[in-house]
Image (spheres, rainbow, N blue to C red):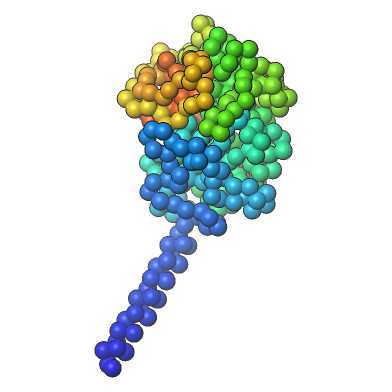
Amino acid sequence: MKESINCTRLFVLLSVILTMAGMAFAQEQPFRAPGMTCSDLAYLHCPDRECSSATVINQGNVVEMKTRRTYFLDFPCDLKKGEKVTFILSLHGGGSYGNWQRHYFPLLDYVNKYRLVVATPNAPTRAWSTADDEYLQNIVNYVIEQLGKENIKAFWLAGHSQGGMTSNRIIRTDFFKDKVDGWLSLSGGRLGGNPGRGATFFPISGGAAAATPTTPPATAGASGGSSTTASAMAALRELPTSDFSFIYTTGIREVDEKGVPETSEWARKFSCGPRRAPVEIVDTKAGYVYDSSRLNLLRPGWGLLPGPGKAQMFVFPDCQDGRIVADVVRLEKGHTEGLEPKVTEELVKLMLSAKGGKLQQTR
C-alpha cells in the first residue's frame, strides 16, 4: 500500500512538472494560434523531387481570424519572445498557391539559420487584387503584435511575378509604405528600368494560358490579361515615393537579348555607385518546383525542368542610408523554375545586409 501511495505521489509530481514545463515553453513561444505547428521539417515541405499536386495546392494551416482565410507561417521552433528577427511577407504569382511559392523561393529552409519569420498567404482567385488587402494587412498586424515591432529588425516584401507586381502596388499604400524596409522582386518587375521580354517568355505563343493546379503562372496581364495586373504593371513606370531597399531577380531566358539594364533610376535615387562586376553563385542542386503543365511546349523563357545552375549577382554599392540595390540574374533559367539553395541563401544574406528598422519608427 505504501509503495502504491508513493507511486501515486510521484506520478502527480511528474504531471505537475511536465505541465509547468509546458506552460513555460508556451509562454516562451511568440506565436500561439489554432492549427499552428512547428517542427524541424517545415509543415508540408516538398521532397527534393516531384512534389505532389495535393501538397503544392495546400493553402496553409494558420487561420487569419478576421477573414477566416488560411496562410503559412514559418519561423524557428526555438524562437523566443524578445528575439530579433527579420519578417518577410511572400506573395505567390498569378494562378499559383502559397505552398508553391514557399518552394519556389524556399525561405522555409533558412528560417532557423537566419532567424526569419515568413508569412505566405493565398489569393482565393489565384490572382492578387485590392480585395485581398485587408487579409494581407491582418496577417502583418498579427505578426507584428505577436513579435513586437521592436523585435523586427526589418520587414520585407517578396513576390513572384504578379505577386511582385502586387508588392509594387501595396508598398505605395498608406499601410505598407511606412513599414516596409525592402522589396525582393522575383521576376515581378524592376524598379528603375525594366528589361524587355524574351521571345519564348509566354507559356504559349501569343500570350499566357490558364493555369493548372501545380502551375505558378505569372503574367496574364502582360498579354492583356486582368485589369489588376495591368494596373500593377502601369505602376512600375513611376518610382515609389517611399524609401526602401530593392533587389530584382530574373531568369536570363525571360528577358530579351539586351539583358537587364546596367543602370537603375532606383540606384540613382540613393546615390549608389556604378553597378559592380557580377559575383557568381554556383548551385549543384536543383530547386523544388516548376510548371509541370507546359513542359511539352518547350518555352525556355517560361521555364523548363529545375536543375543545378549558376547566377550572377550585380550590386550597386555604397547606397545612402544603408540601402541595398541589386540585380540577380539566373543563367539558363526561365520564369518558373524554383530557385536553387545557394542563390536563395545569397538573396537572404543580401536582404539581411540592408538597413531596417522602419517599424520602430511607426506609431
Q: Is residue 103 visible?
A: yes
Residue at the spot 43% in from the left edge and 62% down from the top edge: 25
Q: Residue furthest left?
A: 3
Q: Position of residue 109 (x, y in %)?
A: 40, 39
Left/right of residue 255 with respect to residue 288 in the rendered view: right
Task: Work out which quarter of the rendered image holds the N terminus and state it.
Answer: bottom left
> In which image quadrant can residue 174 be found?
top right
Which sits in the foreground, 143 or 67?
Answer: 67
Residue 66 to residue 176: above or below: below
Q: Residue furthest top?
A: 257
Q: How many marks?
A: 0
Residue 175 to residue 67: above or below: above
Left/right of residue 103 with respect to residue 161 in the rendered view: left
Q: Position of residue 218 (x, y in %)?
A: 59, 25
Q: Is residue 349 visible?
A: no
Residue at the spot 40% in from the left edge and 76% down from the top edge: 16
Which sits in the foreground, 233 or 346?
Answer: 233
Q: Position of residue 178 (x, y in %)?
A: 64, 37
Q: Position of residue 55 (x, y in %)?
A: 48, 41
Which sits in the foreground, 52 or 250?
Answer: 52
> In which image quadrant can residue 204 be found?
top right
Which sits in the foreground, 63 or 51?
Answer: 51
